[in-house]
């Protein structure tokens, strides 16, 4: 049995909202990540939304699609989407799909 996905939204202040993801992001769980992102944008429109992917071990095409969608929606409201703490295997997926060059990715 695969571990359950956990997604937490945290308002960090100064216009920054964090979205912490723990678990695999695949076709079964991608919708939960997108819903959390929508919560992050609700209310005060943040200047930055930071995805903490430190707990993500697997990211498939549905996860890639969610990141692209979130980036597009963030830009529509004038926010910047950033990714932090992505493990090496997730970074490889972001590199192969050329998202590493599009998303702001911190160590």
Image (cartoon, rainbow, N blue to C red):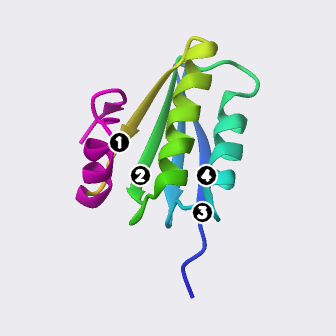
Q: Which residues are magenta?
A: 88-107
Percent from the top left, x then y, of residue 77?
64, 14
Q: Who comes first in sequence, dot 1 or dot 4?
A: 4
**Circle 3 SS class:** strand
Which image quadrant: the C terminus? Answer: top left
**Vertical order, 61 against 71 (above or below):** below
Alpha-carbon span between mark 1 and mark 2: 6 Å
* Tag 1 residue: 84
Alpha-carbon span between mark 1 and mark 4: 15 Å
Give the label, 2 or 4, closer to the camera.
2
The answer to whether marks 3 and 4 mark residues whose Cβ atoms lie closer than 8 Å is: yes
Q: Who comes first in sequence, dot 3 or dot 1?
A: 3
**Circle 2 SS class:** strand
* Tag 3 residue: 6
**Circle 1 SS class:** strand
Percent from the top left, x then y, of residue 98?
30, 36
The answer to whether marks 1 and 2 mark residues whose Cβ atoms lie closer than 8 Å is: yes
* Tag 4 residue: 8
Q: Residue at x 62, y 14 (%)?
A: 76
Alpha-carbon span between mark 2 and mark 4: 11 Å
Q: Residue at x 65, y 44 (%)?
A: 34
Which image quadrant: the N terminus? Answer: bottom right
């Amino acid at each position: 049995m695969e571990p359950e996905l956990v997604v937490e939204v945290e308002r960090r202040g100064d216009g920054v909202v964090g979205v912490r993801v723990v678990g695999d992001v695949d076709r079964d769980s991608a919708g939960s990540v997108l819903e959390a992102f929508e919560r992050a944008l609700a209310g005060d429109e943040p200047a930055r939304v930071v995805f903490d992917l430190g707990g993500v071990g697997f990211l498939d095409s549905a996860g890639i699609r969610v990141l692209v969608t979130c980036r597009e929606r963030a830009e529509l409201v004038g926010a910047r989407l950033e990714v932090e703490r992505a493990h090496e295997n997730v970074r490889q997926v972001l590199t192969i799909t050329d998202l590493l060059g599009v998303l702001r990715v911190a160590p």
